[in-house]
Image: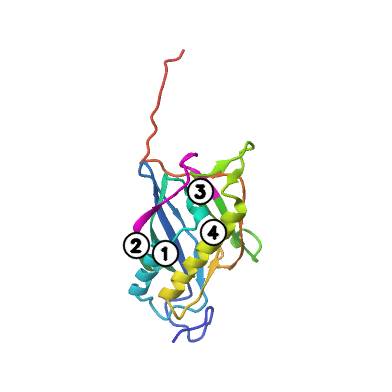
Amino acid sequence: MTTAKGAGIGRQEPAISYVRVSILGTLTGGEVWSVNPVFDPTLEFPGTPDQAMVDAAALAIANRTIPTSVRTIMGTSATRTGARVEIREDADDSLIAISIQGSATPAAGTGAARLTHQSAIVFSIRTNTPGGSGRGRFYWPAIGATLDNNGRLQTPATVTLAADMKSYLLGIRTDLATAFPTIGFDLAVRSKTTHTTPHAVRIQVGDVIDTQRRRRDALPEAYTQVAFP
């Protein structure tokens, strides 16, 4: 039996859950990056999710076509290499099921590498829930961005990026729904403070490049020094 999301009496274990999708990638030099949108099931998983279905979802997402502008802004230094799907419990965020799958063909960015590896464009996820628990964001590599004389994003255009990211996330939602054919999914924001998963109502993208801090163990700096005085 499949129980409605949020139902109490008669709901099967495990408890109400959510899905965290991680789009996995690498940067030239060995650094890694990930983008981690959250999806809320419309209906609850009927018992422990079938591992074959979790694997199928991760594999489909790992091979989903990246829209043109989103792939352009990545730059040739960034490559999508796979995907991870985690199904987690609402009450304490404990892991119920997981699958990590590699892309059949890694998808490198197509824009010329112009910016540093830590450059990113911020996609903000907005819900109707006020406060920080209703807002989310993720950082997409923007090494291939072109800036204007004011240091703002010139190409790809933000209107195109917003539309293409919406298309990409809808495609991921389709991959989840195909793998779990009795369950629908909504893009959401996950709050580990309130243990809520409000649904997205809009996606925003700005024209200022941000910086995503990453550990650079795989890309050590080359230092130059001079004696002083």
Q: Measure the C-alpha gap from mark 2 to mark 4.
A: 21 Å
Comes first in the chain, label 1 or label 3: 1
- Report helix, strand or loop for mark 2: strand
Q: Amino acid at mark 3?
A: Ile
| Badge nearest the viewer, 2 or 4 | 4
Q: Could you say which is closer to the camera, residue 129 or residue 54?
A: 54
- Quadrant assignment for the N terminus: bottom left
* Residue at image coords 58%, 57%: 162
- Mark 3, residue position: 73
- Mark 2, residue position: 101
Q: Amino acid at mark 2?
A: Gln
* Residue at image coords 66%, 63%: 130
113 versus 5 height, above or below: above
Q: Please give the range of residues in magenta.
A: 104-121
Q: Measure the C-alpha gap from mark 2 to mark 3.
A: 24 Å
- Mark 1, residue position: 61
Measuring from the top left, give residue 21's x and y in whole percent.
45, 63
Q: Measure the C-alpha gap from mark 1 to mark 4.
A: 14 Å
Comes first in the chain, label 2 or label 3: 3
Quarter of the figure with residue 137: bottom right
- Mark 4, residue position: 165
Q: Measure the C-alpha gap from mark 2 to mark 1.
A: 9 Å
Question: Could you tell me if the residues under marks 2 and 1 are in contact, i.e. CB atoms within 8 Å?
Answer: yes
Comes first in the chain, label 2 or label 1: 1
Q: Measure the C-alpha gap from mark 1 to mark 3.
A: 19 Å
- Report helix, strand or loop for mark 4: helix
